[in-house]
Amino acid sequence: VTETLVNSWIVMAFLIVLSLWLTHDMKKQHISKKQAVVETGVRMLYQLVGDTMGEDRLYFTPYIGTLFLFTLCANLMGLLTFRSPTADLNTTAAFAIIFFGLVQVFSIKANGLKNRIKGFAEPVPVVLPLNIVGEFSTPIALALRLFGNMASGIVVTSLLYQALTWVSNLVFGSITSFPVFAVGLPAVLSIYFDLFTGCMQAFIISMLTMVFCYENSVREIFFVSVAAYSTQIILYSV
């Protein structure tokens, strides 16, 4: 049992308990402030999915919400001195496998198996190998992107702490072994990488998942691809 697996269980247990608490004693009238906040959040999530994927694909909302919340909580575990599960490639690879399965299922559902296979040879048969490679490169890119952003924060913070500790020992080694220069700055960077980057990456992976799934679940592939790739360029540049 690895540390990543244990921390993932902690995140899942937290989300289950949080869900039970937030949905406990819900009413149709005279609702509490807690229920009002929950309903507002759910309404905003459905609106985001509807605006991104269309009103006829709102059934993606539970998965997108789960993906966002799990990724967000996993990313923020670094603030509690835990290792983030998303800093492990195994976790992000699992996201990629689920994403790949979703794309295939809903693409076949929307276009039919025959058209799905035929689509790999469009617009000309010579691009067949490129389309096949692209089909696998997208989930791989998603996995590596999230893993790289979260793991890099840990690496940069650790290297900076070691460097500042070395400088402190060099300057104050004869007085104290306490790493004077290592106080403050690594903690500030950790908050940046874990809090700001963690929230941003959770939002981006959710948006990219919606864009890719929408792109592959409609018949007008060419026209959708233009808008989808524009969105991808913007999100990948963040």
Image: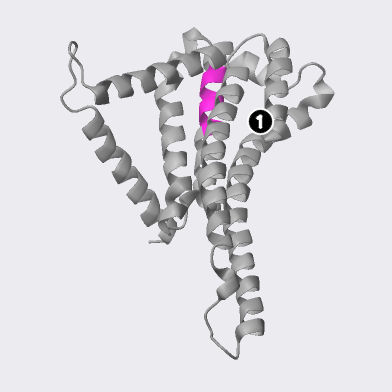
Q: Secondary structure at mark 1?
A: helix
For residue 167, above or below residue 144: below
Task: Describe residue 145's horizontal placement relative to residue 194 as left or right.
Answer: right
Instruction: Identify the magenta region.
Output: 99-108
Q: Vertically, is 130 above or below 141?
A: above
Task: Looking at this view, name the residue that lies furthest to the left.
Answer: 25
**Residue 109 image offset from top left, x and y in percent:** 52, 15
Q: How is the image coloured?
A: one colour
**Front residue (pair 215, 153):** 153
In the rendered image of this protein, does residue 153 appear above or below residue 27?
below
Q: Which residue is mark 1?
A: 235
Q: Is residue 106 magenta?
A: yes
Name the residue furthest bottom. Answer: 174
- The location of residue 208, given as percent across then percent down, is 59, 29
Q: Position of residue 132 (x, y in %)?
A: 71, 31
- Badge 1 density bin: few <14, some 14–19, many ≥20, Cα 10 Å: some
Q: Residue at x 57, y 58 (%)?
A: 154
| Residue name at image x 54 percent, y 62 percent | 184
The N terminus is located in which quarter? Answer: bottom left
Does residue 185 belong to the magenta stretch? no
Relative to 150, is 140 above or below?
above
Q: Residue at x 15, y 24 (%)?
A: 25
Q: Main secondary structure of the magenta part?
A: helix
